[in-house]
Image (cartoon, helix red, strand yellow):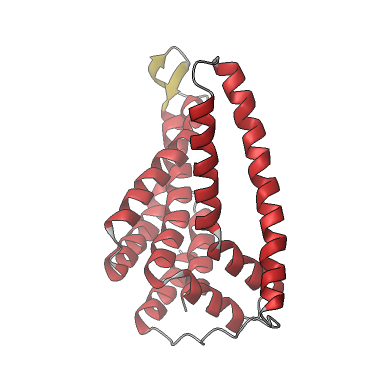
Amino acid sequence: MYLPFIFIYAIGVVTRKSLSELAYFALLFLAVAIMMRPKKRVLLNLGFLLGFEGLLFILALFNPGRPILDTPLGSITHEGLYSFFLLLGKAFLSAGTAVVITSSVGFSRILAEMEVLKFPRILILTLAFTYRYLDLFAEEAERMKRALDSRAFGIGRKEYYRKLGALIGEIFVRAYLRNGRIYKAMLSRGFGEFPRLEEPRPNPSIGLLMLLAIGGLLI
């Protein structure tokens, strides 16, 4: 099952204390990527994820220690560089593995495994509907952003961001109102209980990777 592997792998990654220990899980990530054969779009998402997480941990470069390079923001140290790559490796490997697996097998497979593992039904339904209407939410946000840009030509940056903040609040209000309309439409069409998801079949390859991940916990 993919979901237990993601959990075990993530626990193994975040509990590592050195880059040498993290290298084992990097090889496991490479094996997952080869087995799943992600599409080009997923690889682009991984690149964005790596850059975003790199910005999150960039201040770790300036941890106290032996200086390597002086910058206007401070001295980049040997210890800071080590901490930066350790934090970045933990974050990227754990999140990247989840992205590759979820994109390859489909979110419905993950939900089916959650159902088999007896996760709370309300949690599964919430995730299912969130995933179902995520594209609709993004389209609504993009449409409202386009309307703002067409009407905010020539205004100052401060005023623009003030209007953008109000726009974000309006998006959530619209999402809440639309949620009520969708629920009423579902009830009018006889919605009672969400259909049971098809039970996933076991995968020998992911079972082997799970054993390797468990073995990594013991290193």
The answer to which of 180 and 84 lies nearer the viewer is 180
Q: Position of residue 91 (x, y in %)?
A: 48, 49
For the C terminus, give its image quadrant.
bottom left
Rendered position, 183 above or below 197: above
Q: Position of residue 55 (x, y in %)?
A: 46, 34
The reply to whether residue 15 is in sight is no
The answer to which of 151 and 85 lies nearer the viewer is 151
Whether residue 171 sits left or right of residue 73 in the image: it is: right
Rendered position, 118 above or below 154: below
Question: Residue extending furthest top?
Answer: 72
Rendered position, 218 above or below 150: below
Residue at 45%, 18% in the rendered image: 75
Residue at 48%, 76% in the rendered image: 109
Q: Would you identify the image quadrant in which residue 40 lies?
A: bottom left
Whether residue 51 sits left or right of residue 186 in the image: it is: left
Q: Position of residue 179 (x, y in %)?
A: 68, 60
The answer to which of 5 and 150 lies nearer the viewer is 150
Residue at 54%, 17% in the rendered image: 157
Residue at 39%, 59% in the rendered image: 25
The reply to whether residue 183 is in sight is yes
